[in-house]
Amino acid sequence: MSRTRIKICGIRDEQMANIAAQAGADAIGLVFVEKSPRNIAIDTARQIVQSLPPLVEPIGLFVDEDADHVRHVAEQVGINTVQLHGRESMDDVLALDNLTVLKAVTFSNDPQKLEELIDEWSDPPSHLKALLWDADASDANEGLLGGTGHRFDWDAFAKLIYSGKIDRLPKPILAGGLNPDNVAHAIEIVQPYAVDVSSGVESSRGIKDPDLIVQFCEQSQQAKCD
């Protein structure tokens, strides 16, 4: 039986990084987006990365930044994996072939939009590890595409996965509206490669809650996976 991996995004200090690691998170997200309440300074991010256990992966999150900037920050912080969470294209991903890339995409119930998305991300380069499927909530989040707590239609997404239409796409990461109360149910419906949470483990916007992080990891680990 496979296990769904866990990513806690928006970590801003060593204490929360350590709590996430001890709770069983496979990865943490470090947000390098100035207008985000979860934005982190390079020096702080570097300290967090250096404090992590070997098997917990640090991932840098960027929104619509040029490749040179992404590479520079990754080198300064000491990370090998980045998450592109804006409107980046396949060309933007190809420009980062020295890094492992996760790309956020927006799930849509519009068949035409969904078909266009599938066409764009089919036959991905080897360094594009996964697509992070999120809800479309940019209008309610100051133009940011994630961390809003909004969810999308998981049943429709599960049907899409089981249809085989996205078999040629990178592995699916489920994001958007996840929290300790619903993550096990979401995993059992969708059976994703990984789950990604940010606002769902916060006591207020941008402030992580250690108890919610632990509960989220516990519920994710207890979910039934095929």
Image (cartoon, rainbow, N blue to C red):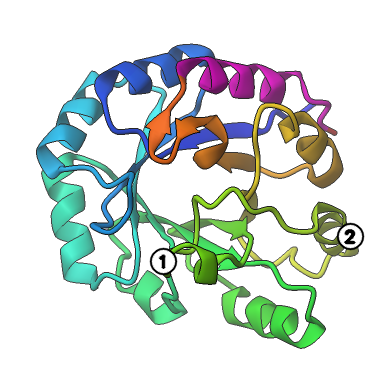
- Specify whether residue 219 is painted magenta: yes
Q: Nearer the viewer, residue 120 or 202?
A: 202
Residue under numbered circle 2: 159
Name the element at disc 2: helix
Measuring 53% from the left and 52% from the top, which residue is drawn there? 148
- Left or right placement of residue 80 versus residue 45 in this view: right
Measuring 52% from the left and 72% from the top, which residue is drawn there? 139
The x and y percentages for residue 183 are 72, 33
- What separation in Å lies between label 1 and label 2 (alpha carbons)? 31 Å
Q: Which amino acid does label 2 sit on?
A: Lys
Measuring 14% from the left and 43% from the top, which residue is drawn there? 42
The x and y percentages for residue 149 are 59, 48
Q: In which quarter of the image is residue 166?
A: bottom right
**N-terminal label among 1 and 2:** 1
Is any part of residue 74 visible from this angle? yes
- Left or right placement of residue 142 versus residue 170 in this view: left
Q: Nearer the viewer, residue 184 or 93?
A: 184
Residue under numbered circle 1: 142
Name the element at disc 1: loop
- Segment colored magenta: 210-225
